[in-house]
Amino acid sequence: DKGRRLAALLREVDPQFELEPEAEGLLLHMADDFVKRVTRPACVAAAHRKGETLEVRDLQLVLEKQWAIKIPGIGPSRPQVKVPLYVRPPPGSNLMALVNKEPAKKKSKAAARDKQEADAASGSASGSGSGSGAGQPPAKKAKT
């Protein structure tokens, strides 16, 4: 029975302590709830790895990731792999120059295309304006 095991555990900690029935019931309820909250996602982890049995590594994964509980000495230890979110390029590398250059090329092509469209709409060729003023269309020649 769970109550007897709990009382035996308490006696191991301190033989002078006694557990009230209400406290025993609360502890048993909390333990059952904790076991359910760990085993359900551990079963999902086992199914995800295509396993048919719940293994220690499944329980370890849930305990570590969801509860921040690490139990040393039980099961194989998993290597901790930290993936950096950003890797600083080494000093003197041209990586940033290449990254910054790409958008500039796209902008300059778009700007050149816009300028050509504006020139075509105003009726003047690039660089062949009559100098009649900024923003003014060139004066038309009178036919004689």
Image (cartoon, grey):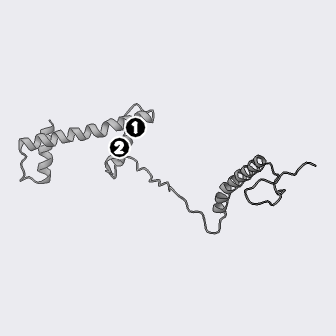
Residue at 71 percent across and 55 percent down: it is 108
Of helix, strand and loop, which one carries label 2? helix
Residue 139 placement, left or right of 63: right
Q: Residues within 10 Å of mark 2 (few under 14, many from 20)?
A: many
User: Which residue corresponds to mark 2?
Assistant: 62
Q: Nearer the viewer, residue 19 or 83?
A: 83
Tell me what residue is drawn at x 35 percent, y 48 percent: 64
Secondary structure of the residue carrying numbered label 1: helix
Amino acid tagged 2: Val
Q: Residue furthest bottom?
A: 92
> What residue is shown at x 37% (from left), y 38% (from top)?
55
Q: Quadrant of the N terminus?
A: top left
Identify the mark nearer the N-term, 1 or 2: 1
Residue drawn 91% across the image and 48% down it: 143
Locate residue 127 relative to residue 85 in the image: left or right: right
Quote the CA–CA distance across marks 1 and 2.
Answer: 8 Å
For residue 46, above or below residue 81: above
Q: Is residue 95 above or below residue 43?
A: below
In-front residue for pair 82/46: 82
Q: Position of residue 127 (x, y in %)?
A: 82, 57
Residue on which the image places disc 1 = 45
Give percent across and percent down for residue 98. 67, 59
Q: Residue furthest right?
A: 144
Q: Amino acid at mark 1?
A: Ala
Query: Mark 2 and mark 1 in contact (Cβ < 8 Å)?
Result: yes
Pick the front one: 5 or 86: 86
In the rendered image, which quarter is residue 48 located in? top left
Front residue of 64/123: it is 123
- Binning the other alpha carbons within 10 Å of mark 1 as few (below 14), some (14 to 19) or many (20 upward) gives some
Q: Position of residue 121 (x, y in %)?
A: 76, 46
